[in-house]
Image (tube, helix red, strand yellow):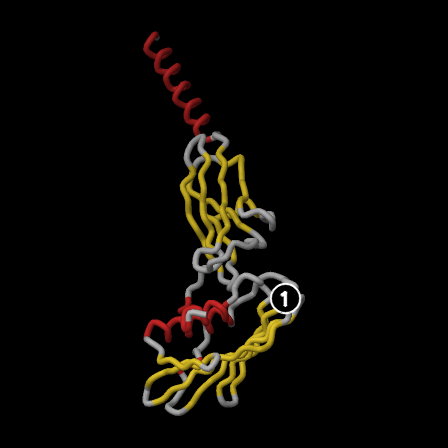
């Protein structure tokens, strides 16, 4: 009889401990940031979804003015966070939350899978003795005159012309140019007072896109990478 009572007490103790462990009040700190773009401005994500076992358990709208968000009252376990990047692409991050801890996860809002973008960059269409242009006009509180980059193909080599400078492009620079165009057609972010209006033209093809993010600044980054300006 004594053995039965002891076993019952041990079982009850183990069961209560397990329930305590599962009911720990954990906090998850979500850091929103640019990982590729050198930008210290506001980081906006319209909605974050928190999933466990492939089920949405919470939807959260982060504060626009804060780079950090906190989700509390979470039990220990594995979670998945789903969110949208500035390129309208769905991303997810998995994290194991411990007991009585504050866990942190970083969300890269400028993450992009270039292979998933359904677009052929104009540089891949160029034939010898052809060119295409990238034109930028900024409108808003501080308007700026238009800027233009020309991309030419001569004797199977590619050249960029900007501000009376002409240079032959390396393989790395060609790849940067392609990525710029793929990012541009996917940019969908913000509602800034300034608008960067892009026009990319090749023969009869013309691509017009407005960027209201005030964070992407793809043209400036491209000029910096190609010409150091």
Q: Residue at x 57, y 47 (%)?
A: 66
Vertical comparison of 103 with 135: above or below: above
Can the viewer see residue 53? no
Residue drawn 41% across the image and 82% down it: 166
Image spot of residue 97 (x, y percent):
43, 38
Q: Is residue 56 left or right of residue 11?
A: right
Crowding at dot 1, Cα within 10 Å, few <14 / some 14-19 / many 20+, comes out as: some
- 180 shown above or below 102: below
**Residue at 43% over, 80% down:** 165
Residue 202 in picture, x, y percent from top left: 49, 86
177 relative to 192, above or below: below
Q: Mark 1 points at which residue?
A: 194
Instruction: Answer with the quarter of the image where residue 146 lies.
Output: bottom right
- Outermost residue toward the top in this view: 2
Depth check, front residue: 206 or 222:
222
Confirm whether residue 96 shows in the render. Answer: yes
In the image, 229 versus 173, the foreground residue is 229
SS assignment at label 1: loop
Asked if residue 193 lies left or right of residue 56, the reply is right
Give x and y (percent) for residue 190: 60, 61
Left or right of 25: which side holds 3? Answer: left
Q: Foreground: 95 or 145?
A: 145
On-image quarter of the C terminus: bottom left
């Amino acid at each position: 009889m004594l053995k039965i009572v002891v076993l019952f007490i041990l079982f009850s103790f183990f069961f209560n401990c397990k329930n305590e462990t599962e009911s720990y009040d954990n906090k998850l700190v979500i850091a929103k940031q640019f990982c590729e773009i050198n930008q210290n401005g506001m980081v906006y994500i319209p909605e974050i979804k928190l999933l466990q076992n492939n089920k949405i358990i919470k939807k959260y709208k982060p504060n626009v003015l804060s780079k950090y968000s906190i989700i509390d009252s979470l039990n220990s376990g594995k979670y998945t966070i789903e969110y949208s990047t500035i390129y309208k692409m769905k991303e997810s991050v998995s994290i194991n939350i411990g007991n009585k801890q504050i866990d942190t996860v970083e969300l890269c809002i400028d993450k992009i899978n270039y292979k998933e973008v359904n677009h052929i960059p104009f540089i891949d269409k160029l034939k010898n003795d052809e060119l295409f242009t990238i034109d930028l006009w900024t409108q808003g509180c501080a308007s700026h005159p238009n800027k233009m980059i020309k991309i030419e193909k001569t004797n199977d080599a590619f050249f960029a012309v900007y501000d009376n400078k002409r240079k032959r492009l390396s393989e790395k620079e060609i790849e940067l140019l392609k990525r710029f165009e793929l990012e541009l057609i996917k940019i969908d972010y913000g509602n800034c007072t300034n608008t960067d209006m892009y026009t990319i033209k090749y023969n009869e093809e013309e691509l017009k896109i407005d960027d209201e993010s005030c964070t992407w600044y793809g043209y400036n980054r491209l000029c910096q990478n190609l010409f150091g300006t």
